[in-house]
Image (cartoon, rainbow, N blue to C red):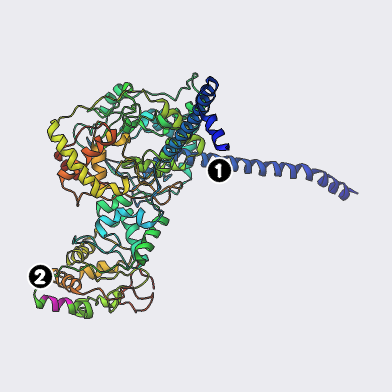
């Protein structure tokens, strides 16, 4: 009897035990599933922030850093952000990570050089920062100690960053603009925050700072010798006249009916933008289009006398007919999106002629993306054309077909032959 | 008389006709104008034709230096590509993209291109068989040429140099999948590559056999080998040997046996 009772008791206990076990197991499973969701979200956001571009050395281990970043103040080597406990960020907490993103400070309170775009990342929400951190914790740890920076005096003194921060750093998460749509706000959050577009598309002053008042007005990217066009002026890459579809195509596929990405922007499309979802790229396009300030097309002031520039034009037309018209067409309309149009292409007519000169000298492929897996390439002409021919043909494409760019001198062409290609 | 009737009707003699005929013409004009505008709109929406959907049209960027059909150009340092094994070409494309083989203009062009596209490029150039471009003859003495010939076909056992033909084939047209042909290249290009192997600016998968070979050559050996190879005509069939045809004297990471 007794035994029977014990058995009955045991039997009666079983369901709750099983239930509790099931609950614990399913809770653990749910936690694991949540973690996976957060890691996946973090991976996506890390793409949006293009962390890989700086924190992975070409041919090196993922996120192990060590990439040399040339700056006007010396060379900075990017940090190892794998979860290795000694050389990476394995011993960091989510608070530590948020402090670097949001406040530009290392866990010990030390100041981070603004080569890390914390001026933009400060706008990232705590939730998104935590997701990125969870993702970075999930990548394989790599033991690779950070390389000391090679900065010139006085820039090797980190205390100088305090001055820089006072002038140029405004800490704070993105604030929703209640007068704009949710889509516009999402676009602004991505462009101003993780996308850190201002790092190139806002003029950089002699102190290496970019000012809020000139946000997205374009500028020459230091050391790289590429010009990042203004996003606010129709005359440059202002997108007021573009359709949302065209902007989305350009950002995500790398090519559009209006033109293609090249130079440093090819990297951004390749590593970051092509991986974003439809809604986010579209939101960025909506926001970017709204930045247009409807700037009027003012005639360019040129340092080259009129007779000389008309000679350049006629010589340029000959060079164009021989080397360019086959793809870009005699009327400059190209065969978009494969061979981009040059007529009405703002990228050709910008105040700075650096980009069209470099495209002629170095050629280039748009990035190979899911939307454009086999891009058409432009041949380099550095070894075929003389400085005079480059100057003439760039002058021609900047002024033909109603384009309104200023003439280019052979000296400008010559100087850019030495521009770095990496 | 029906024709006359029609003629009469068209006569703009009466007020009613003036109005109705005018209205009809206006209507027609509106339709025509609409058609013209519609055509113009269609025209501006699709202003131009698309580029040809071919590898040739995509790879005009390569033609400037390597020739339209990958046959090479007069430039001493830009090699021919046509007919080299696809595996070899793919290895080079990936090495340039990942900067393991350093030449800034190539590193820059390939930086953001994914493997499947690079493989298509490699396959494309490997399959081309353009007419050979005549090559400049290196101005070296007969003795130097003889030394080059001997190194290429027999090697220099005393100094641990295997013959080029041991891996690159008796006709020096290479071997599938990844050993390149050595004919149809300029002397300057060959000596530059041997130098790059030796100094580590050009590297291949480990074991990097060409680095070992290049390191065992003297400066004058390099000149001799380059001059002799550049003096050889491209054979009528420049296709590489099938995979595994030759027992290779060295282990090479790029050509696993």
Q: Is residue B43 above or below residue B125?
A: above
Q: In the rendering, at what x and y percent does residue B73 appear?
A: 22, 61
Q: Quadrant of residue B171?
A: bottom left
Instruction: Look at mark 1 in the image and give the residue it sits on.
Output: A36
Crowding at mark 2 (Cα within 10 Å: few <14, some 14-19, many 20+): few
Residue at 29% of width from left, 25% of height from top?
A: A297
Task: Tell me the element at label 2.
Answer: loop
Is residue A26 magenta-colored?
A: no
Is residue B222 at least partly visible in the picture?
yes
Q: Quadrant of residue A37?
A: top right
Q: In the rendering, at what x and y percent does residue A399 appear?
A: 24, 34
Q: Is residue A390 above or below residue B161?
A: above
Read off the magenta span: B144-148
Considering depth in this image, is A116 or A110 the residue closer to the camera? Answer: A116
Q: In the rendering, at what x and y percent does residue B63 appear?
A: 28, 57
**Is residue A385 toward the left or the right of residue A130 in the image?**
left
Q: In the rendering, at what x and y percent does residue A239 appear?
A: 38, 30
**CA gap, disc 1 and disc 2:** 67 Å
**Circles 1 and 2 on the same subunit:** no
> Which mark is drawn over residue B139?
2
Magenta segment main secondary structure? helix
Considering depth in this image, is A222 or A114 the residue closer to the camera? Answer: A222
Q: Is residue B239 above or below residue B192?
A: below
| Chain of the residue on which disc 2 is drawn | B
Q: Is residue A179 above or below residue B184?
A: above
């Amino acid at each position: 009897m007794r035994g029977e009772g014990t058995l009955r008791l045991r039997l009666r206990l079983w369901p709750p035990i099983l239930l509790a076990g099931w609950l614990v197991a399913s809770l653990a499973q749910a936690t694991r599933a949540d973690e996976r969701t957060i890691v996946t979200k973090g991976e996506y956001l890390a793409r949006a922030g293009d962390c890989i571009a700086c924190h992975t050395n070409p041919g090196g281990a993922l996120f192990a850093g060590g990439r040399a970043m040339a700056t006007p103040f010396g060379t900075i080597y990017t940090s190892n952000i794998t979860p290795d406990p000694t050389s990476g960020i394995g011993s960091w907490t989510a608070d530590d990570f948020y402090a670097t993103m949001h406040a530009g400070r290392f866990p010990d309170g030390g100041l981070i050089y603004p080569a890390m775009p914390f001026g933009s990342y400060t706008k990232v929400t705590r939730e998104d920062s935590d997701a990125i951190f969870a993702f970075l914790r999930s990548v394989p740890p790599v033991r690779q100690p950070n390389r000391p920076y090679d900065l010139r005096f006085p820039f090797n003194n980190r205390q100088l960053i305090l001055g820089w921060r006072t002038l140029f750093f405004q800490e704070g998460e993105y604030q929703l603009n209640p007068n704009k749509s949710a889509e516009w706000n999402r676009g602004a959050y991505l462009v101003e925050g993780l996308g850190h577009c201002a790092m190139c598309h806002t003029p950089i002053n002699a102190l290496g700072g970019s000012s809020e008042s000139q946000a997205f007005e374009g500028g020459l990217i230091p050391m790289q010798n590429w010009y990042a066009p203004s996003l606010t002026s129709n005359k440059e890459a202002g997108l007021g006249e573009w359709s949302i579809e065209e902007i989305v195509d350009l950002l995500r596929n790398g090519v559009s009916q209006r033109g293609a990405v090249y130079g440093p922007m090819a990297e951004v499309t390749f590593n970051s933008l092509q991986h974003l979802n439809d809604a986010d790229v579209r939101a960025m396009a909506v926001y970017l289009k709204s930045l247009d300030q409807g700037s009027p097309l003012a005639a360019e002031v040129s340092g080259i006398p009129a007779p000389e520039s008309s000679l350049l034009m006629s010589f340029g037309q000959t060079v164009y007919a021989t080397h360019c018209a086959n793809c870009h067409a005699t009327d400059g309309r190209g065969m978009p999106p494969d061979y981009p149009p040059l007529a009405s292409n703002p990228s050709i007519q910008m105040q700075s002629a650096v980009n069209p000169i470099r495209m002629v000298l170095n050629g280039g492929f748009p990035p190979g993306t899911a939307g454009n897996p086999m891009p058409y390439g432009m041949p380099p002409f550095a070894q075929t054309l003389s400085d005079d021919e480059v100057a003439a043909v760039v002058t021609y494409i900047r002024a033909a077909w109603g384009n309104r760019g200023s003439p280019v001198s052979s000296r400008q062409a010559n100087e850019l032959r030495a521009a770095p290609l990496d | 008389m029906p024709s006359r009737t029609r003629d009469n009707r068209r006569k703009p003699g009466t007020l009613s006709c003036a109005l109705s005929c005018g209205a009809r013409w206006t209507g027609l004009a509106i339709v025509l104008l609409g058609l013209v505008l519609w055509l113009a709109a269609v025209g501006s929406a699709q202003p131009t034709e698309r580029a040809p959907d071919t590898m040739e049209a995509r790879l005009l960027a390569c033609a400037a230096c390597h020739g339209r059909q990958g046959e090479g150009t007069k430039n001493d340092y830009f090699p021919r590509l046509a007919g080299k094994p696809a595996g070899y070409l793919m290895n080079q494309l990936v090495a340039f993209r990942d900067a393991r083989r350093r030449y800034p203009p190539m590193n820059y062009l390939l930086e953001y291109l994914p493997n499947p596209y690079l493989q298509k490029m490699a396959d494309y150039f490997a399959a081309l068989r353009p007419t050979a471009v005549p090559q400049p003859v290196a101005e070296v003495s007969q003795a130097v040429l003889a030394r080059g010939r001997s190194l290429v076909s027999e090697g220099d056992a005393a100094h641990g140099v295997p013959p080029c033909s041991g891996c690159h084939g008796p006709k020096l047209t290479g071997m599938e999948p990844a050993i390149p042909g050595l004919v149809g290249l300029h002397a300057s290009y060959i000596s530059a590559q041997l130098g790059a192997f030796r100094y580590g600016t050009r590297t291949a998968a480990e074991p990097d056999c060409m680095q070992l070979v290049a390191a065992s050559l003297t400066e004058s050996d390099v000149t001799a080998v380059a001059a002799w190879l550049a003096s050889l005509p491209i054979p009528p069939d420049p296709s590489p040997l099938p995979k595994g045809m030759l027992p290779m004297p060295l282990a090479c990471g790029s050509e696993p046996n």
